[in-house]
Amino acid sequence: MGKIIYGSEVSSELREELRLEAEHLKQEGKRIPKLAVILAGDNPASLSYVKGKAKACEAAGILEETFHLDGSVSQKELEDLIHQCNENAEIDGILLQLPLPAGLDENHAIEQISPHKDVDGLHPLNFGKVHLGIPAFAPCTPLGIMELLKRMGCDCDGKNAVVVGRSKLVGEPAARLLLNANATVTICHSHTKNLKEICRNADILIAAVGKPRFFNHEYVKEGAYVIDVGINRMADGHLTGDVDFEDVKDLCAAITPVPKGVGPMTITMLLENTMKAYREAVNESGGL
């Protein structure tokens, strides 16, 4: 049986490290890192996500302030708030909770976030730097994927990596980070031919298609490292991934489960990015 890597356990370790760092800053009388979360409207899923992020910040010793705007907020009002957060030296990271209410321009709003405070890694400047191999804030889920591969003991250098899914939040940046780590990367999607054959040649398989238990043993090479990004709620209420876990676990060198796999890592990497933004702000100012 392959090694099961629980993102929930890795996440707890990283958050404790962040908490200790924040506690050290507090003891020295220094400013504490702070994340601003901007939420527009009352999307139930978004409300739940924001609540989870606030709880995670508190546990890690990072300050958090949620700006909850009415669903009828104008583009200008939203962007004025973003600019205010950009100018506030007490705020290190800005997260714009997506999706935005209908009628608001998501891309334009993201472009207003200072790249230095873009801890979600979605600003075009940061996105471009990541694709050029220049140090920058990367999207949180792909960062979590790379950390899990590290915890699996997987050296990406020279390995064949297959990413199934080409979203801008997961697939594309994950492929780029793997390439930056010297893996040979193939991105597959809904138009890909011979998907099984391609996946069976993968030393590293990243599944991010949103299809429950789609990847069975026919898709997985023996000894592969498998990262399951999918989170699918079944009719009975249970969560399952894109990988048929029971069918492939004995084939893998290591695999992440669903739940308790990639999911917990996403918020943790958001916290890591916030601390990183804080450190960079302190270095620029010569100390805070």
Image (tube, rainbow, N blue to C red):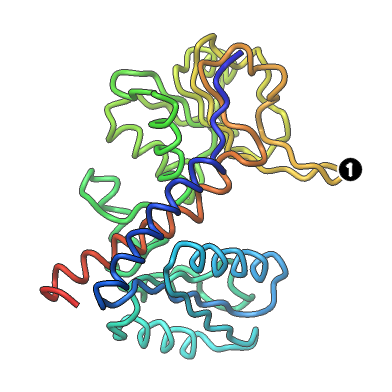
- Say which of 185 and 287 sits in front: 287
Residue 167 position, x and y percent, is: 51, 46
Depth check: give the residue in front, 286 or 74: 286
Q: Amino acid at mark 1?
A: Asp
Q: Quadrant of the N terminus?
A: top right
Rendered residue at 42%/31% (across/down):
151
The answer to whether 7 appears left or right of 135 in the picture is: right
Task: Place residue 197 in its image quadrant.
Answer: top right
Image: 46 above or below 232: below
Instruction: List x then y, in percent, for residue 61.
Output: 43, 67
Above or below residue 2? Residue 45 is below
Quarter of the image containing the C terminus? bottom left
Q: Is residue 233 above or below residue 64?
A: above
- Figure quadrant of residue 230: top right
Q: Specify whether 11 is left or right of 42.
A: left
- Residue assigned mark 1: 236
**Residue 52, quarter of the rendered image:** bottom right
